[in-house]
Amino acid sequence: MTIDIQAVLHRVVVEVFGETEVEWEDDEREAPHVHCVRLRARGSGDGQERNAALCASYEWFEAHLLDFEVGTISFDYDDDEAEKEVEIGDLARIIRAYLQGEGQVTYRPTLFRRRLLPTLTIDMDGTRWHFRGRTSWKSPL
């Protein structure tokens, strides 16, 4: 049975964010098997506008926090729609925490070019998430 990943993504985003909390922009990509939703906070806890994107294909899911160019990606090769929905839901809750103003940003210099590299840390559901560039890791609180 084929899973309609676009319907799963839409269902999860509506469940986590509701219809009115975010502005919806369907991302038109060259790859028709990838579906993205851009999310924008209208008024987060710190008063700043925050932007993020949640993308899903049949095999991978990505949360991208656009303001700091950090994110995470997860893979699920199974054919179980419920598992895919849980994976997308976890990423959506991370994005929701970020859009609501949670998280702390620290900067450290890179080895080359001496520019500052941001690391975003979000505490959520007993787990501390760290995002730096395209890598992420989590640890228990």
Image: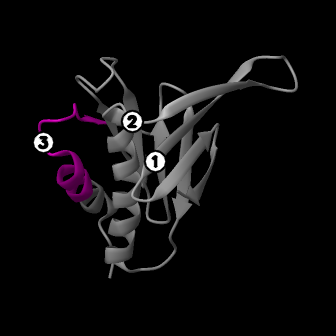
- Residue 98 shown in magenta: no
Q: At x 53% / y 60%, what residue is drawn?
A: 74
Spot the residue most to the left.
Answer: 20
Q: Are marks 1 and 3 in contact (CB under 8 Å)?
A: no
User: Of the residues shown, which amino acid type is indicated by label 2?
Assistant: Glu
Q: Nearer the viewer, mark 3 or mark 2?
A: 2
Residue that carries the numbered disc 1 in the rendered image: 123
Return the disc, 3 or 2, that comes first in the chain's sequence: 3
Q: Relative to 103, is 49 above or below? A: above
**Residue 139 occupies which quadrant of the picture?**
bottom right
Q: Is residue 83 above or below residue 112?
A: below
Image quadrant assignment for residue 26:
top left
Which residues are the magenta region?
Answer: 10-26
Viewer can see residue 139: yes
SS at circle 3 = loop
Q: CA distance from mark 1 to mark 3?
A: 25 Å
Residue 130: image x %, image y %? 58, 45
Relative horizontal placement of residue 30, taking residue 25 as reference (left or right): right
Give the residue type that dot 3 points to: Glu
Disc 1, SS = strand
Of the numbered discs 2 and 1, the one sitting upstream in the chain is: 2
Q: Which mark is residue 19?
A: 3
User: Could you tell me if the residues under marks 2 and 1 are in contact, i.e. CB atoms within 8 Å?
Assistant: yes
Name which residue lies at 23% across and 35% down. 24
Q: Which mark is residue 102?
A: 2
